[in-house]
Image (cartoon, rainbow, N blue to C red):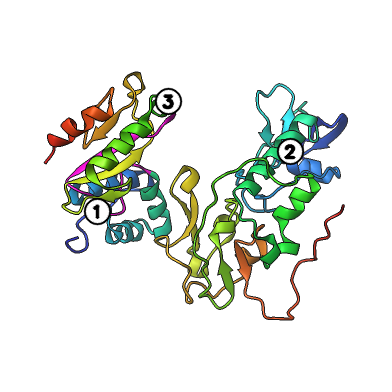
Amino acid sequence: MEKKIKLTINGKEVSARPDMTILEVAKENGIDIPTLCYIPDLSPIGACRLCVVEVEGSRTLVGSCHTPVAEGMVIQTHSPKVIATRRVLVELMLASHPDACLVCDKANICELRRIAADLEVGLPRFRARKHYYPVEDEHPRMVRDMSKCVQCWRCVIACKGESGTPLFGTAYRGFDSKVIYGFDQPLGSQACDDCDACVEICPSGAIRKVRKAGEERANKALFIKG
Amino acid sequence: MAGKGVITPPRDRADLVERLKETQRRYGHVPEEAIAELAESLAIPVHEVYGVASFYSFLSLKPLGRNVIRVCKSLPCYLKSAEVIMKAVEKELGIVPGETTADGRFSFELINCIGLCDHAPAMLINHDAHVDLTPQKIKQILKSYE
């Protein structure tokens, strides 16, 4: 039997395998840490920072999706500092996200919106610049609207592409960072004819299915409380 | 670009930046053909090479003018009114950052910290540093570049 290590999450002592991440251990113990860029079973990205937790002795908050557990770790997953940080992160994402939920096809199945509702983030206080890119709608099965991208890079790691060449990459730097296809071209009609992985995992309206009128949505509809 | 096989093939992925720099030196920018060629010889997708080329300020994806003006946009220069310098360059050349003059004499770019903060605001023209800038100095400096 593999060696187990002991650590403390939210004051409760738990045991875990040494190759697990904090997020996995938390999940196993019924603690819900919000995530946006994390995809189970794929290598962690650590881009969205929503899964940050407080680890005793660490100068900064750490991303739980990519931090392995260690013997004797003392972790707080929902301390006031953690919650405040997560709220500001979502607020900043919303601040540079187009105010187009009303007309967005993903509006009531949107992960970003669900997380914002869970964390009780309302209208952002910040007036940030927004990105405006043309909508790429030539492809028969997916529409890409990079104005709505929150740069979680899920599509970048999830796509294996046809013939093993991933479809998306990252380019530029700072505010101009963008998930690109080819030479930063629009997604043409011939771009890909494989799975719908990127459509399924995109947490915002940036990549979505071409939906015919009356067709049912894949995800469960979101009901926002309050 | 003159045909295939002009660029030294990269040894491995770590060599990619050096080969992109070589391309930039030889052609004045990194053309799409070069990106495609590098991607093919490393057997990686073009978007990966494009991503690297677009990340660095000293690599350009479009052709540049004979002289490249790079004004620092980082915080220390900003606090020393780099915006006034940018406006002065804009006024002198009639172009905004990211553009090249019609005669191909100057390209105007903004750049991140160039390590001349002790003499902010600063800019580079080609590889010459110009420091402690004032809008009045701009005209004189630009005159010395043909």
Q: Residues within 10 Å of mark 3 (few under 14, many from 20)?
A: few
Residue shown at 52% from the left, 66% from the top: A135
Outermost residue, top side: B118
Secondary structure of the residue carrying tag 2 is: helix
What amino acid is found at the position of numbered circle 3 in the picture?
Answer: Leu
Residue annotated with mark 2: A22
Tag 3 near tag 2, CB within 8 Å: no
Q: How crowded is mark 2: few (under 14 residues within 10 Å), some or many (20 or more)?
A: many
Q: Which of B39 and A198 is in front in this view?
A: A198
Q: Is residue A107 above or below residue A45?
A: below
Dot 3 and dot 1 within a common chain: yes
Residue A2, percent across and down? 77, 40
What amino acid is found at the position of numbered circle 1 in the picture?
Answer: Pro
Per the model, the C-alpha gap separating discs 3 and 2 is: 42 Å
What amino acid is found at the position of numbered circle 2 in the picture?
Answer: Ile
Residue A130, percent across and down? 55, 50
Q: Residue B118 carries which label?
A: none
